[in-house]
Image (spheres, rainbow, N blue to C red):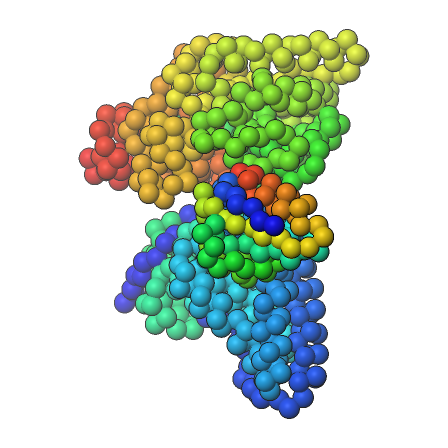
């Protein structure tokens, strides 16, 4: 299961938003990955190290994938998080 | 022979002292072990220990500096517990490495990768180093470096300063800070600013030549480090640092009183404002009441908050700004749609009169009740004033004033003690500056918010690095707009203050007095200097400076006027 979403968060996927994203991803049983929409470098969404390393900025499109019992739920929530324009 | 090294000033303060290089040393360690089970346990124990230390620091930073900076330590905890780091460490240990060698190896690749990526990712490499060194120090049994044990008048020099270090610095002891690398927006610079520590960052390789024990001046205003300064430079820096706090209201040399108040972003900052001798609060932001929670604060909670602020400043004025909420700050329980231009969007008074009308009513009720209690309290408590943000249209002000009257009538009917506080408008749109006389006709005061006013007059986003040159309130069009707002307010007998960063720059105090301001409100840390400068100012000379500055056609011509070179 996968979803493409454009990151609206002011600060991209760094620091505080990255923290919140990794924290949220860790709450699901499913295996979740995040990477650039063109498929480059999908990484474990539960790894702060890897997520920060992607260098995602506001306006970048990212691809989220999830495999597991709560995959649908996980994608809904993570997409909502990335679409929120918070700093 | 003194020598001057240039960097980037992080705080507008200077300090002098004796150099001490800050090198959180990590002892040599063995690299190979034949007991992987024991090494794995050592790693797990060290990680638990480090996690507890990070959590503790997180709380301290949240209290002393703010939630924003505390979030950095939250990220550190996540790096510490990162699954990739964990598996890399385990692989190294399985291959015969000690826990120390494994940690070093596990962080080496990501640090290199982050730096190769550049930009904001590269800035995070410092955080990885911080986490790695914390683990290595814990494994070696070395206590975290005790910054509290530094002798007085220490100037700390460092390659770079990680956020958790900067948060542990005591500005009463450490006289200043300079780093080889880092920029104005590096976390360490932000923390130094928040705790009022003179700091110059990004000095470069030349800083490494400065030896322990040398005497240096760190001048965060000029952005320089002066090695072996002459007596004059030394005294100047010392006087500036030891500037006396002036508690009473000040007047210019020729007797015009100028109120110097503090900008406050949350209640925790009230104490610093009192300590710096502020004449009350010129801008009490209320957004903190609404952020980082799941439901809006109720009337009683707000009433308590405003009443506490009033009690902190007996006999002085607290200017509360009603909520300036918009698309740039996340608030979960509000409908804040993403806007292409949040600073030109639905925010401030626009929302208060529109989608957030209920929130506005609750805030007004709390404010009017606090004003009522304060009035009964006489001189034992402060006087409340309330201003509205983002006003662009006179009819918005009329509508806001109608709400105030309606709330007062409802409270009266219910027998609740209340009073209508002194009311004002925050002038931050060119529209409000243009209509200053008409706005001032309806209220008691205007307060000029220069940060936003500058971005709107110059059409230059304050957060866009590419247009920072335009984002300077000394550009003639901004100065002339400010002058019009001041004159417009005075024409209709309103007092006029200023609550932007500009108001806290002692180098501009004379100009601002010359332009006619009655009140200056700034970060607590600059208040003693601004007050001292007010006392040295002569109104007539200040007016002459203002007149020449208003006649200037370019920013550089204004700067020449201020330097006395015109």
Q: Nearer the viewer, residue B7 or B105?
A: B105
Count all numbered tags in the image, as a single digit: 0
Q: Image height check: is B515 above or below A19?
A: above
Q: Position of residue A4 (x, y in %)?
A: 52, 45
Q: Image height check: is B265 above or below B238?
A: above
Residue at point 42% right, 64% down? B115
- The answer to which quarter of the image holds residue B308 is top right
Quarter of the figure with the C terminus of chain B: top left
Residue at point 56% right, 11% down? B399
Residue at point 35% right, 30% down? B459
**Is B82 left, or right, of B192 in this rendering?**
right
- The answer to which quarter of the image holds residue B429 is top left
Which residue is situated farthest in the front direction here? A1
Q: Position of residue B248 (x, y in %)?
A: 55, 34
Residue at point 31% right, 24% down? B480
Q: Position of residue B197 (x, y in %)?
A: 49, 53
Which residue is situated farthest in the bottom direction here? B34
> Can I make out residue B452 in this image?
yes
Q: Position of residue A77 (x, y in %)?
A: 64, 44
Q: Nearer the viewer, residue B236 or B519?
A: B519
**Is B318 left, or right, of B157 in this rendering?**
right
Q: Nearer the viewer, residue B134 or B247?
A: B134
Q: Image height check: is A64 above or below B475?
A: below
Quarter of the figure with the N terminus of chain B: bottom left
Q: Nearer the viewer, residue B28 or A27?
A: A27
> Can I make out residue B538 in this image?
no
């Amino acid at each position: 299961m996968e979803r493409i979403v454009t990151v609206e968060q002011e600060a991209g996927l760094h620091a505080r938003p990255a923290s919140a994203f990794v924290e949220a991803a860790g709450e699901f049983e499913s295996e979740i990955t995040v990477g650039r929409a063109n498929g480059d470098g999908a990484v474990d969404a539960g790894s702060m190290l890897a997520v920060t390393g992607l260098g995602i900025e506001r306006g970048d499109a990212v691809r989220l994938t999830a495999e597991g019992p709560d995959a649908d739920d996980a994608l809904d929530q993570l997409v909502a998080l990335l679409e929120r324009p918070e700093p | 022979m003194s020598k001057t090294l240039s960097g980037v000033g992080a705080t507008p303060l200077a300090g002098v002292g004796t150099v001490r290089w800050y090198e959180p040393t990590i002892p040599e360690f063995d690299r190979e072990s034949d007991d992987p089970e024991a090494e794995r346990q050592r790693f797990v124990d060290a990680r638990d220990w480090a996690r507890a230390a990070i959590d503790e620091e997180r709380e301290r930073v949240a209290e002393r500096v703010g939630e924003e900076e505390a979030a950095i330590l939250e990220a550190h905890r996540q790096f510490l517990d990162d699954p990739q780091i964990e598996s890399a460490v385990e692989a190294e240990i399985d291959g015969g490495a000690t826990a120390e060698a494994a940690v070093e190896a596990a962080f080496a690749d990501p640090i290199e990768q982050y730096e190769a990526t550049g930009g904001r990712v590269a800035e995070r490499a410092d955080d990885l180093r911080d986490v790695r060194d914390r683990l290595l120090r814990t494994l070696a049994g070395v206590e975290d470096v005790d910054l509290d044990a530094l002798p007085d008048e220490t100037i700390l020099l460092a390659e770079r300063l990680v956020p958790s270090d900067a948060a542990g610095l005591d500005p009463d002891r450490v006289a200043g800070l300079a780093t080889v690398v880092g920029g104005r927006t590096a976390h360490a610079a932000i923390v130094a600013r928040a705790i009022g520590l003179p700091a110059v960052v990004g000095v470069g390789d030349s800083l490494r030549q400065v030896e322990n024990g040398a005497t240096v001046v760190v001048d965060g205003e000029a952005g320089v480090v002066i090695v072996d300064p002459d007596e004059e430079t030394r005294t100047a820096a010392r006087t500036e640092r030891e500037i006396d706090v002036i508690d009473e209201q000040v007047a210019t040399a020729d007797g015009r009183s100028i109120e110097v108040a503090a900008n406050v972003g949350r209640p925790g900052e009230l104490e610093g404002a009192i300590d710096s001798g502020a004449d009350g609060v010129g801008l009490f932001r209320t957004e903190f009441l609404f952020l980082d929670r799941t439901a809006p604060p109720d009337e009683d909670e707000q009433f308590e908050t405003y009443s506490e602020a009033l009690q902190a400043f007996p006999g002085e004025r607290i200017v509360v700004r009603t909520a300036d909420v918009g698309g740039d700050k996340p608030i979960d329980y509000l409908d804040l749609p993403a806007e292409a231009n949040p600073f030109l969007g639905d925010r401030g008074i626009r929302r208060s009169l529109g989608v957030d009308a209920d929130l506005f009513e609750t805030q007004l009720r709390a404010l009017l009740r606090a004003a009522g209690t304060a009035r009964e309290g006489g001189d034992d408590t402060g006087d409340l004033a309330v201003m509205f943000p983002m006003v662009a249209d006179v009819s918005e002000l009329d509508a806001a004033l109608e709400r105030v009257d309606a709330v007062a009538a409802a409270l009266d009917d219910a027998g609740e003690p209340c009073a209508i506080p002194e009311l004002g408008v925050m002038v931050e749109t060119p529209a409000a500056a243009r209509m200053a006389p008409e706005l001032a006709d309806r209220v008691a005061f205007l307060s000029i918010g220069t940060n936003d006013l500058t971005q709107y007059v110059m059409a230059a986003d304050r957060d866009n690095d590419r247009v920072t040159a335009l984002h300077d309130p000394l550009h003639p069009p901004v100065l002339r707009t400010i002058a019009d707002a001041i004159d417009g307010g005075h024409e209709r007998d309103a007092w006029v203050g200023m609550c932007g960063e500009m108001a806290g720059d002692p180098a501009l105090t004379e100009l601002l007095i010359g332009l006619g301001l009655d009140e200056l409100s700034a970060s607590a840390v600059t208040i003693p200097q601004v007050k001292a400068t007010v006392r040295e100012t002569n109104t007539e000379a200040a007016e002459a400076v203002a007149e020449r500055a208003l006649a200037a056609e370019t920013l550089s011509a204004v700067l020449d006027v201020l330097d006395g070179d015109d």
